Amino acid sequence: MKAVQLNRRDFLKYSGFGASGLLLGCATAKTNMLASTLQGATAVDTSPETLNLFVSIGSDNRIHLINHRSEMGQGSKTGITQIIADELDVDWQNIEVIQGLGNYDYGSQNTDGSTSIRSFYSKMREMGASAKRMLESAAAQFWQVDLAQVEAKNQVVINKVTGKQLTYGDLAELAAKQPVPDVKLLTLKNESDFKFIGKPVAAVDLDDIVTGNTVFGIDHEMPGLLTAVIVRCPVIHGKVKSLDDSAARKIPGVVDVIQMPETTLPVVFNPLNGVAVLATNTWAAMKGREALKIEWDLGKNQDYNSKDALAMMAETVKKPTKVIGKKGDVDAGFAKAKTVIEASYSVPFEVHAPMEPPMSTAMVTGDSCEIWASSQNPQAIMKHTANLLGTTEDKIKVHVTLLGGAFGRKAKADYSLEAAFLSKASGKPVKVVWTREDDIQSGYFHAGSAQYMKAGLDDNGGIISWLQRVSYPSIFSTFSPKDKGIQGFELGMGYGDLPFEMENYQAEASSARAAVRIGWMRSVCNIQQAFALHSFVDELAHSQNISTPKFLKAIYGADRKINPKEEYNFKYFNYNEPLKKHAIEISRYQAVLDKLTQEVNFDEKLPAGQGWGIAIHRSFVSYVGVATKVEVTNGQLKVLDVHCAIDCGTVINPDRVTSQMEGAMIFGLSLALMGKVDIENGAVVQSNFHDYQVLRMSQTPNIHVHLIPNGNYPGGVGEPGVPPLAPSLANAVFAATGERYRTLPLNKYLSV
Amino acid sequence: MPMIQLNINDKNYEVDAPEDMPILWVLRDLLNKKGTKFGCGKGLCGSCTVHLNGEPIRSCVTPVGIAKNSKIKTIEGVDETGAHPIQIAWKENNVPQCGYCQSGQIMSALSLLESNPKPSDDDITNAMQGNICRCGTYPRIKQAIKDASKAMESKS
């Protein structure tokens, strides 16, 4: 086994936000861990022979493959299976996918940061190939021949001399006794021999989804289970001053009313203070909650208003602040420039709103706890639940259900900790159900932000000088009692890593007060930073009377690789990938631009009120360009067409990559057109889908996805589609109307 | 409290529930039929869509009391083998991402095709307007409904 030591900051330790932890080699055969996984995940009535952590084969030729990552619609459960199965060389019909329990032996299970494929592509190939080699070794031993004389293919091992065959099932028991091969000696398949990788394999849960046979977090059942609905203090770090639960306790089905512990500072993933109603069914718990009479001590955050906070951020970015990246001398650059342009942008607070709100069941027994959760990060649940209960992580067993969407929300372990707290307090298994109101009002919010941009251009429209400032509450505020400023990984998302040729450059950043839990939402700080960046690039192009695609081509400049440390003295995290493996390559931006200009005629003469906009953004080490066509008539904005081109390197499942891009366009449209969370007197104003609106079918444009496959290492897919949508849309509206909208969402200005 | 008689997917059930309990929670918590999902609790997202006497309703806001002597159809009653043309079209288009809203999407689509076998694009959009998919599967839902419409036409 090979462990990769990662340089993790404290933040990563607390949040689990990062690419990967321990990366596994091939584990020893038949570990206890796997046995418990199989037992825990599903009833397996065969007795599979375990070849490694991810592969076990039954004598009946059933192939059990572990998916250790969470499935929330992004398709990695299918993708991981494709990768292992390809190298193992088995029939797809024989595969049963088993969801792995939370366990560090798998490496990181934090299904976050668009990492499932990019972090595990090579490892999963090795797992499949290693198991295949063990089957070959078993056959060689059985026939008493050299390993070179046998070959595994299509779930049989062939004796190349005699032509005899043994199935994987025949060999399973013997194979499990073979030594684990050295990874370096494994031969991986040639690309041309792939039978699953690169193919549009249908999602493994498809049949269950269309028959209503799926198990999400909300669907977990067990004997004696109580359902809890919690009223949380509307203002963070506020608490219950007085409680009258007499009416609630009278509601049939209500079993108990329990006060939640005081909110910790920092909050991390600990429960929020409030009151839980436990009942024999969800409806009774909801009615019980409505019947509670609570007086709150709202605490110091009740003075917080997001409108004022955003105005203050907008003021902050007008003045010099902490420099985080620098090249040359921007003042000298501006003095030389022929044209100087400046603009300010703002994106409000947002919330994830997955269709399944957070849901978790916990059963505490003695010093142990078993949890079933729609979670992106079972290892975070293990760690933080162990802390909460005063026990050790090995006592926390976490089952990951299917996730009804997540978008970063379910990487936080808080709702499992609530369930664990209530199970311990009540002595019963407890399922915590979040209502939609809970989800909108007590989330881990995408931070509202302000950004200032200033550029000086020369006679030819080249960038002589570039100054940018940004302000928002840092995600770190959720994990640290002290404001330590905006973190490097946040600034590394389309802010400190610009791909343009610039003589002089300066980037500054200033964090803002956090008065709600700040989290990460699909594509994180790329949302606001890409919006400002690509809106501003469009403004610069228009100022030069050059089409934006042509302007982009010019400012990308010469084909080269960009190292933000060398270029801007900015310590760049590169989504936890080495720059050697995943460089910032101008040629890949150019290829995306070329693809879009092939698909879309940006110079086309359009009817009045119509326009195209474009934005190309690299995030999660993939490159995505979006071209959006809109029509604005009498104040009504209609999005007509969206073209999305993605270069995510090697594509495992083209259909799932395409579906992720479709979904990212729609997610991006939701936030750009309508997404806004307001905080008044410390409490979130919006409460459900009537006032936190997300895109519906009637607002959905035609979406065309273009994959640009190449031999590069796989990049992220779940998130990178989101950032370029909003700026491409605002740019299209400008092209259509001449109006530049620099604050999202656009329904502030137009009917959508 | 008198027992409430229900007919769900052509089977009779008797449940001990207050009349104001929404059908959603009767299905999920009392009858262990988990295919129908909770999304908003206010009739805003359509995840909980079932048919009541053939009409699509939001079961999260429909009290079980009004379903007495009525027929309820849920996702489990469409075709448990997944062989209904709608389910086939859903699979052929690889519609779902996370899958959570899809029971409700399918029930709304089924209702549309039962009342309007050859819907126009606008008909589809109108019928599906109440069903949110946060993953963004709308383009594929639309295509799947068109495909199912064709398949059902050639079948009949």
Image (cartoon, rainbow, N blue to C red):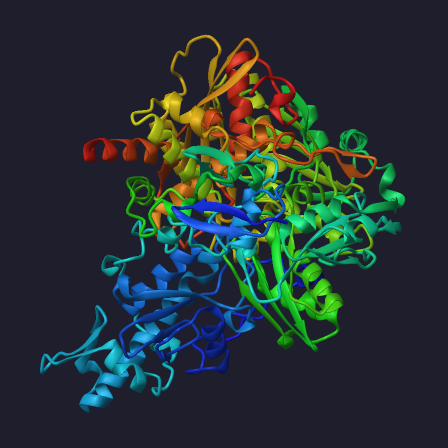
The answer to whether residue A698 is left or right of residue B86 is right
In the displayed structure, A278 sits above or below A26; it is above
The answer to whether residue A204 is left or right of residue B20 is left
The answer to whether residue A590 is left or right of residue A620 is left
Along the line of sight, which residue is nearer the eye, A433 or A57?
A433
In the displayed structure, A630 sits above or below A52; it is above
Residue at the left extreme of this rendering: A162
Coordinates of residue A493 in the picture (x, y in percent): 60, 44
Along the line of sight, which residue is nearer the eye, A701 or A131?
A701
Question: In this view of the protein, can residue A569 be seen by the observer?
Answer: no
Question: In which quadrant of the rendered image does the C terminus of chain A lie?
Answer: top right
In the displayed structure, B1 sits above or below A133; it is above
Residue at the front extreme of this rendering: B2
Q: Residue at x 35, y 65 (%)?
A: A96
Coordinates of residue A4 in the picture (x, y in percent): 54, 71
Along the line of sight, which residue is nearer the eye, A734 or B69?
B69
Question: In this view of the protein, can residue A223 be seen by the observer?
Answer: yes
Coordinates of residue A749 in the picture (x, y in percent): 63, 18
